[in-house]
Amino acid sequence: MAVVFEKPSLLQRVAPVFQGFDIPLLLAIGVMATIGLVTMYSVGFDHGTRFSAHARNMMLAAGVLFVVSQIPPNRLMSLALPIYTVGVVLLLGVEFFGIMRKGSQRWLNVGIIIQPSELMKVAMPLMLAWWFHRREGQLKPLDFAVAGLLLAVPVALILKQPDLGTSLLVLSAGLFVIFFAGLSWKLILPPVILVAIGIVVLVTMEHDWCAPGVDWKVLHEYQRQRVCTLLDPTKDPLGKGFHIIQGMIAIGSGGIWGKGFMQGTQTHLEFIPERTTDFIFAAFSEEFGFVGVLTLLAGFLFLIVRGLIISLEAPSLFARLLGGAVTMSIFVYAFVNMGMVSGILPVVGVPLPFVSYGGTAMVTMGVGLGILMSIAKSKRLVQT
């Protein structure tokens, strides 16, 4: 008696690709993307084609998210070492053959112009999560030292370009992996305390460290100026301090409810520099006020909490470390951007996730969220 096997339909074959997505995470991403699009339309409607380009970048990031979410964590783990190696080689290429623009050597021509430091935002947590997964159950102090070396090499190369903002983001992503892997607080607190004491001493000493001609040795001149501007932006209100002063004015003038959609005077009279990129939070605060800022913060908080829950429930150490680092990187992006615009952190050129204009940053965010979605899908497969 012949057995007839029914050929599955196209819908049945395609359906598994769309299954297993974490619905709360998808909703959070959708809400944040909507806030980003509304904000870009409001603050950038008289700024060329920024809104349409921002929407295009979001669609590209959504495509990247979907593709990355189909890659199981085990497959991502096998890609960690090759991606990290390629990233470091490209950074060395920038050092010797990079393209110089505006005093920085950050780009490399490999047929197309690329910025290898952006790759390290993903490669760094991948590599360290892979390393600690291999050492699971037998971790020793030497393993943390090796992880520190793996982190220090690309961070040093990025700092030398110089690119303080990206180096801080890569450093934080790596440090989160090391912390989640079980680094003792006894090793964390001493350097933190020393840095805090150093900052207090620097600020309280009578010597004018920000006087013209003073060389800080370890920082480039533009980095020194950013720190000095943070300490007292009123010393150069029409120059280096202009960004921070105008940002704080815009944030304060928004009040409780804001000036309204497309009604920000500081924004549209162009007092806010980079109002669609690094300083878009100031424009957002002016137009949507304290209530709008609370809504934005609530959206980020939900996204971060959901990402941490997904990471905690991940089926492997690699996935837990990687998911936790990716999630906390989103927190760092948001905190640093809002902090520098508000005048509590130096201006380092970090975009606000979902809201700031920028194709590379948006695609990088898509990769990170795709990794989280992949971890969530793998958890569901293990459970079923």
Image (cartoon, grey):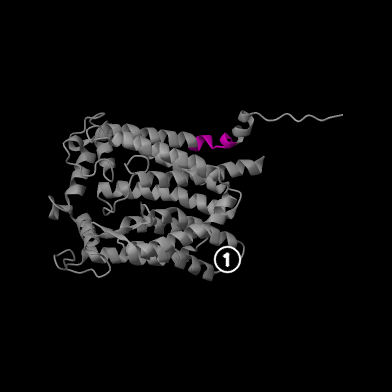
Q: Is residue 161 left or right of residue 5?
A: left
Q: Check residue 20 for magenta coloring.
A: yes
Q: Point out residue 69 in the picture as x, y percentages from the top left corner.
A: 53, 43
Is any part of residue 147 visible from this angle?
yes
Q: How many marks?
A: 1
User: In which quarter of the view is residue 253 placed?
Assistant: top left
Q: Check residue 252 for magenta coloring.
A: no
Q: Is residue 151 above or below residue 356?
A: below
Q: Is residue 216 left or right of residue 68?
A: left
Q: Residue at x 46, y 39 (%)?
A: 63
Q: Point out residue 228 in the picture as x, y percentages from the top left corner.
A: 20, 59
Q: Secondary structure at mark 1?
A: loop
Q: Residue furthest right?
A: 1
Q: Point out residue 368 in the picture as x, y percentages from the top left corner.
A: 46, 47
In this view, the residue in front, 273 or 62, is: 62
Q: Residues within 10 Å of mark 1 (few under 14, many from 20)?
A: some
Which residues lie in the magenta part?
Answer: 17-25
Q: Is residue 351 left or right of residue 19?
A: left
Is any part of residue 291 visible from this angle?
no
Q: Residue at x 81, y 30 (%)?
A: 3
Q: Amino acid at mark 1?
A: Leu
Q: Quadrant of the N terminus?
A: top right
Residue at label 1?
139
Q: Point out residue 153 in the picture as x, y percentages from the top left corner.
A: 41, 66
User: In which quarter of the view is residue 227 placed?
Assistant: bottom left
Q: Is residue 339 above or below residue 28?
A: below
